[in-house]
């Protein structure tokens, strides 16, 4: 009688194929369900359409006079574009780079000495420094001043004083003409 319980059917199958098939189908249904639940969460991590649309912008710089700057929004962050005066360029180029916290020569931060293009976010805690408008405080070095914690940047956007660890970031940009800069 014990032999009949383990006997192989006459058709040659071991009898476990139906159970294995059910396991396989259950695992496949579970994997499909997990993927269906996970997909919206994974998809939500992609950048939104408005961010993708602003991944690169072109800015008309023809109206900016020497010593003035503008702030535009790029990728949700302020972007500083400044037309520097000869005095600001001279001050930026005359700095001993070896004495800087984040050493970087002015020529490595600009494509044309007259134009400075920076992401306007303080590298300390993400505040927006002042200095684009002539009425705003510009700190001891004539560049940008972050009033939140006192970080001061020079006329090339390099950190000179205060708690910020790094220079203001330079975004990827190019001049498409004498009056237009493309950022991104």
Image (spheres, helix red, strand yellow):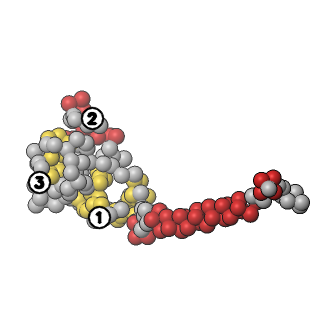
Q: Nearer the viewer, mark 2 or mark 3?
A: 3
For label 2, count other residues whose C-alpha is less than 10 Å away and answer few (under 14), some (14-19) or many (20+): some
| CA distance for labels 2 and 3 | 23 Å
Q: Along the horizontal axis of the image, is 128 left or right of 104? A: left
Toward the viewer: 146 or 135? Answer: 146
Q: Along the horizontal axis of the image, is 28 left or right of 15? A: left
Q: Quadrant of residue 68?
A: bottom left
Residue that carries the numbered disc 3 in the rendered image: 147
Residue sitting at 27 percent across and 60 percent down? 78
Q: Secondary structure at mark 1?
A: strand
User: For residue 72, which numbered disc appears in the image?
Assistant: 1
In this view, 76 is above or below 111: below
Which numbered disc flags the more N-terminal residue, 2 or 1? Answer: 1
Toward the viewer: 117 or 29? Answer: 29
| Res. 184 visible in picture | yes
Q: Secondary structure at mark 3?
A: loop
């Amino acid at each position: 009688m014990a032999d009949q319980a383990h006997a192989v059917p006459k058709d040659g199958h071991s009898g476990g194929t139906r159970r294995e098939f059910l396991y396989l189908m259950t695992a496949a249904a579970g994997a499909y369900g997990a993927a269906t639940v996970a997909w919206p969460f994974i998809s939500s991590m992609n950048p939104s359409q408005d961010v993708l649309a602003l991944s690169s912008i072109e800015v008309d710089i023809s109206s900016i006079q020497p010593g003035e700057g503008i702030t535009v929004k790029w990728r949700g962050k302020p972007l500083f574009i400044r037309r520097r005066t000869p005095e600001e360029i001279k001050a930026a180029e005359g700095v001993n780079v070896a004495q800087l916290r984040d050493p970087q020569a002015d020529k490595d931060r600009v494509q044309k000495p007259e134009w400075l293009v920076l992401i306007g976010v303080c590298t300390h805690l993400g505040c927006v420094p002042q200095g684009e408008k002539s009425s705003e405080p510009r700190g001891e070095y004539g560049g940008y001043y972050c009033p939140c914690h006192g970080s001061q940047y020079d006329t090339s956007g390099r950190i000179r004083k205060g708690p910020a660890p790094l220079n203001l970031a330079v975004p990827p940009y190019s001049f498409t003409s004498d009056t237009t800069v493309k950022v991104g």
